[in-house]
Image (cartoon, grey):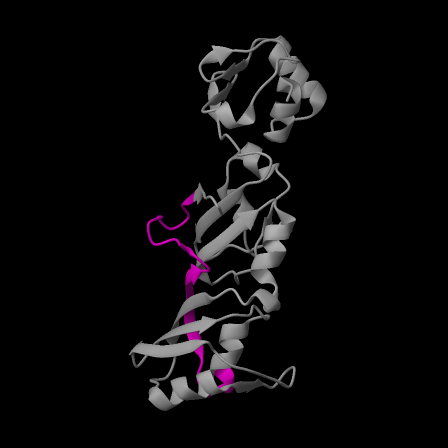
Amino acid sequence: MQLVKYLQAQGIGSRRQCQILADSGLVVVNGETVSDAKAEIVPETVRSLDIGGKPVCVIPLPCFYILLNKPAGYETSHKPRDWPSVFTLFPGNLRNADMQAVGRLDADTTGVLLITNDGQFNHRMTSPKHHVAKLYRATLKHAADAAFCERLESGVLLHDDNETVAADAAELSDPHTLLLTIGEGKYHQVKRMVAAAGNRVEKLHRLRFGAWSAEDLPVGGWRFVSIG
């Protein structure tokens, strides 16, 4: 891949802008200045990238996968309405990449959020037929008991769409803390299921999505992950 195309893929700017940066000697790859815009770059070998003396986030190519420990107060949207976009948590060049969240978390919901530019992976993780497990910790308004969990596991009727859905697993770590595992991703599903079972979610945190957990990341922290 030519340097100019590599820089474009890294979200640095337009082809013309990347050409000017290279011609001006402002591009440093793995500690070496590369001033030929047509120089061949092997993306897998790039460990560091500096533009104009400033380090830039190196984006894995052609596909990347991000694990984010989402904080409260951010919308999972490129065009948020009431809160900042969750994508503003990333460096500038990464924000320029064509990436989408794998499903959504409400603005007030925290925890594991996957983000990628791989459409096939996104579909595989969110399609109901693949039944990828998602584990949530819900803080309940009212104290619950074993019968409440049994209702969730046997199936509850979501009144606003007249459909019965069941949890893969439901257990209480204390009367106000529910651990709920679901294999679907319907709109506000956890909150709606809890409401249908006769309670209310006061706080919601996603602990795990498939094989991924964000417990080793600080709130708002992120890292690239491998799906292999």
Give how far across and how far down residue 40 sits, in percent. Answer: 61, 16
Query: Can residue 103 be seen here?
Result: no
Q: Residue at x 57, y 34 (%)?
A: 61
Residue 221 vertical placement versus 72 (above, below): above
Q: How many marks?
A: 0
Give how far across and how far down residue 154 sits, in percent. Answer: 47, 87
Q: Residue furthest left?
A: 174
For the N terminus, the image quarter is top right
Residue 214 vertical placement versus 41 (above, below): below
Residue 14 vertical placement versus 90 (above, below): above
Q: Left or right: where does residue 52 sit relative to residue 19?
A: left
Q: Residue at x 52, y 45 (%)?
A: 65
Q: Left or right: where does residue 48 sit relative to residue 18?
A: left
Residue 215 part of the magenta segment = yes
In magenta, the rendered stretch is 195-222
Q: Left or right: where does residue 113 sit relative to residue 98?
A: left
Q: In which image quadrant can residue 7 be found?
A: top right
Give how far across and how far down residue 121 sits, in percent. Answer: 59, 52
Please state which of residues 197 and 200 is positioned toward the viewer in this rendering: 197
Query: Can residue 202 be seen here?
Result: yes
Q: Residue furthest right?
A: 16
Q: Residue furthest bottom?
A: 147
Q: In which image quadrant can residue 98 be found?
A: top right
Residue 198 part of the magenta segment = yes
Give how far across and how far down residue 112 sits, in percent. Answer: 44, 56
Please state which of residues 78 and 36 is positioned toward the viewer in this rendering: 36
